[in-house]
Amino acid sequence: MKKKLIVFWVVLFAAVLLLNYSFAGNIKEPSAAGTFYPDNPKELSKMVDSLISGANPQKSDTDAFILIVPHAGYGFSGQAVAAAYKLLKPKKYKTVIIIGTGHHYGFSGVSVYPQGQFITPLGSVEVDKEFARKLLDQDKDIYFQPLAFEKEHSVEVQLPFLQRSLKGFKIVPIVTGDCTLSTCNKLALLLKSAIAGRNDVLIVVSTDLYHGYDFEEAERMDSLTISFINNMDAEVLYYGLRDGKLQMCGGFGVVSAINLARYLGYDKPSLIDYTHSSRVTGKMIKGIWTVGYASIVIDSKREDNAMLNKEERKKLLKIARSSIENYLKTGEKLSLSETDPLLLEELGAFVTLHKRGELRGCIGNIIGRGPLYLTIRDMAVESATGDPRFSKVTLDELKDIDIEISVLSSMKKTDNPDDIRLGIDGVLVRKGFRSGVFLPQVATETGWSKDEFMSNLCAHKAGLSPDAWKGDGIEIYTFTAEIFSEKEL
């Protein structure tokens, strides 16, 4: 009985502590003031302003979307940090997502601070609870772990720079623990969904680079790490960190940010500044503890707005050919797995087969119904064996088949056929239960005028009268396609 009573009081005491913490947790007091940066407001403001004023980044102000910046004490990494913050346009950003990393509390997954305020000597910053809500309770690995923030400096040290650089913003504080590559991808996907076309969101990833006792090794390893960031190769970066070939204490946040940038069509990053603690202190001697600091910005979208890079296109074409060959030999679907976040996207796609320049099969999904790489697998097999216009492709003739893939954007409804761009837009027409679709390349391959394109679409694909697209009750949707083939690659 006595043991039960003790257990009861221990449990009750713990519950009260947890309840009190949950209420107090809405206000995050500073834990790094006075150590990583000054705790006197005037001294802190003067220091941050002086660092930003003295910074000389290689770029001028930009429409920065992602900043990768250090989080050491200001006396060590402050100049590298300031070079990145000097790029920002003060009135552009309404929400700043700060992705830090856990230094004091070990946990798995990603912790997102849900609501409240973060305090610094310069005042309070409100958490964007509406944005945070879109990240929480979506996946078991992305949740709120209050202890991840209790003593953590990696998020906090960014705040004074933000407070002196921006006006009227809210923050979404995030701390990464031990993350799988899948968790990094999930965070990127949730961020993509939560941003949903906004152009007033800034991502700040807080990370230092090399930690060790050899400044020359720091420079070599950091150069390699930065090269993988510049190549936006998130998977190689992740496993390089796991294998110890690369070093970043906030590396999982960087992996997530790179995936997010690729999802949204951003171009390669730019290095703004690099240094390390031995260089800052002037003690370029082996055996002195050295930490690497880099500031990197991602600020521009690819001019061609391509979704997929060359390697991803090659991988999808290989999947298509291997899937057809495997099915023709075994009658079974090819077993596949994939980690590339873009190939895991639910996107519509068509697989087209040509034999000596002549169409040999074409089937696809307008709307994504599963991961892109599995859609390509399934549509490749259907194009080879299920297109009712052609006999099934045989194993002997597969060597003569050229495979083309079209990855589709989302549909946009239009009320004006004049807006259709021949050779750029694919078109879907629908009236009642009848519908038909032409891919963008149909106009290029046939040389049709717009009238011929639309009339043939209605008559031969939708089973409607040729001029149905000019009448009432017709729905017209356009989309774009990223088209690539084995012949090209």
Image (spheres, grey):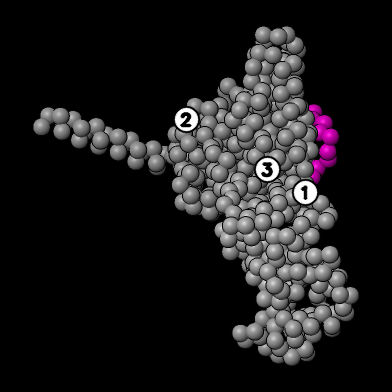
Give the amino acid type for the residue marked by disc 2 in the picture: Gly
Give the amino acid type for the residue marked by disc 3 in the picture: Ile
Hey, which residue is sitting farthest front in the picture? 396
Judging by the rendered image, the residue that carries numbered circle 3 is: 258
Judging by the rendered image, the residue that carries numbered circle 2 is: 106
Which range is magenta? 54-64
Q: Whole-Å distance between the Cαs marked 1 and 3?
A: 17 Å
Vertical arrangement, residue 446 with respect to residue 342, above or below: below
Camera-side mark, 1 or 3: 1
Question: Does any portion of residue 274 appear in the rendered image?
Answer: yes
Q: Secondary structure at mark 3?
A: helix
Vertical arrangement, residue 19 with respect to residue 451, above or below: above
Q: Secondary structure at mark 1?
A: helix
Towards the viewer: 208 or 453: 453
Residue at the image position 73 percent from the left and 8 percent from the top: 285
Give the amino acid type for the residue marked by disc 1 in the picture: Lys
